[in-house]
C-alpha cells in the first residue's frame, strides 16, 4: 500500500502556504482589535478630566499641555515692556485708552 494514498501529503511548500494564511488571519484579527481599542483625538476631546486621569498616558499628555501653556503664559507676562514696546504690542483693533 502506498503511504501517499492513505495519508494527506503535505509538502514544505504547502505547509508554508498554510502558515502564511494563518499568519494573515491572525494579523487581520489583531489589526481589527487594535482599531476597536484605539482612542481618537475626537474621543479624547469629549472625555472628562476624570476619564483622562484614569489613563496614565492621556493624563501625562494633559498635564504636559498645561505645563507648556503655563510656561508660555509666564514668559509672556514676565516681560517688562517699555512704553514704546507696549504701544506696538497692542492689537490694531483695540483703542488706546488715555487718561
Image (cartoon, rainbow, N blue to C red):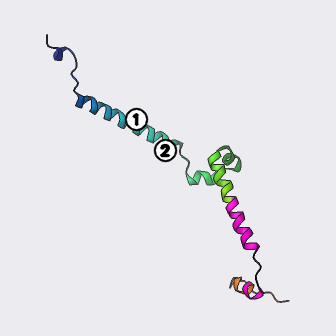
Q: Nearer the viewer, mark 2 or mark 1?
A: 1
Name of the residue lying farthest toward the right: 99
Looking at the rendered image, the quarter that the C terminus falls into is bottom right
Mark 1: which secondary structure?
helix
> Which segment is the magenta one?
66-85
The number of callouts visible is 2
Residue 10 lies in quadrant: top left
Q: What residue did someone put label 1 on?
A: 26
Q: What residue did someone put label 2 on?
A: 35
User: Alpha-carbon neighbours of circle 1 within 10 Å: few (<14), some, or many (≥20)?
Assistant: few
Above/below status of 3 relative to 84:
above
Judge whether residue 69 is colored magenta.
yes
Picture coordinates of residue 65, whole percent (x, y): 66, 59
| Residue appearing at x 72%, y 73% in the figure | 76
The image's mark for residue 86 is none
Residue 71 lies in quadrant: bottom right
Picture coordinates of residue 96, whole percent (x, y): 77, 87
Above/below status of 67 relative to 32:
below
Picture coordinates of residue 80, whole percent (x, y): 77, 79
Amino acid at each position: 500500500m502506498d503511504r501517499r494514498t492513505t495519508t494527506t501529503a503535505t509538502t514544505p511548500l504547502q505547509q508554508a502556504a498554510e502558515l502564511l494564511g494563518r499568519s494573515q488571519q491572525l494579523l487581520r484579527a489583531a489589526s481589527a482589535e487594535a482599531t476597536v481599542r484605539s482612542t481618537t483625538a475626537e474621543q479624547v476631546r469629549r472625555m472628562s478630566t476624570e476619564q483622562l486621569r484614569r489613563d496614565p498616558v492621556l493624563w501625562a499628555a494633559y498635564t504636559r499641555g498645561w505645563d507648556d501653556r503655563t510656561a508660555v503664559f509666564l514668559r509672556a507676562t514676565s516681560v517688562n515692556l517699555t512704553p514704546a514696546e507696549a504701544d506696538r504690542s497692542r492689537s490694531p483693533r483695540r483703542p488706546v485708552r488715555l487718561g
